[in-house]
């Protein structure tokens, strides 16, 4: 009985790694002056997709772009921090 219990505990004592698969493979950051028209254009690697983002009036702006794979359109959002 003890051997069976030990085998069962060893079999079900597995780390849950699901959260690691949802993390991004890349994270990129850059710092630049805000353009006068408050608009920037982002382009995916290889130039497959371009998106224009309007930057808010905040002092710091965070632009988040998520792409699941190269064949699907990227989704983005701009947030301002005051």
Image (cartoon, grey):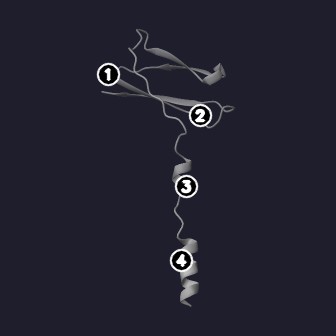
Which residue, given by chain and number where applicable, does mark 1 sit on? 59
Sequence-first tag of 4 and 2: 4
Q: Are marks 4 and 2 in contact (CB under 8 Å)?
A: no
Q: Which residue is mark 3?
A: 18
Front disc: 3 or 1: 3
Asked if labels 1 and 3 touch by Cβ distance under 8 angstroms, the answer is no
Asked if the residues shown at circle 2 and circle 3 are in contact, with their CB atoms under 8 angstroms apart, the answer is no
Q: Is residue 15 left or right of residue 50?
A: left
Q: Give SS at disc 1.
A: loop
Which residue lies under the disc numbered 2? 67
Q: Earlier in the sequence, mark 3 or mark 1?
A: 3
Which structural element holds mark 4?
helix
The percent coordinates of residue 72 (x first, y second) are 67, 33
Label 4 or label 2, whichever lies nearer to me, is: 4
Q: Which residue is mark 4?
A: 9
Judge depth for marks 2 and 1 and give the one in front.
Answer: 2
């Amino acid at each position: 009985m003890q051997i069976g219990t030990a085998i069962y505990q060893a079999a079900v004592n597995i780390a849950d790694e699901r959260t690691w698969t949802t993390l991004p493979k890349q994270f990129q950051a850059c710092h630049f002056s805000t353009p006068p028209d408050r608009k920037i254009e982002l382009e995916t690697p290889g130039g497959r997709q371009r998106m224009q983002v309007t930057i808010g009036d905040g002092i710091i702006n965070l632009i988040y772009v998520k792409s699941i794979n190269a064949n699907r359109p990227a989704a983005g959002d701009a947030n301002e921090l005051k």
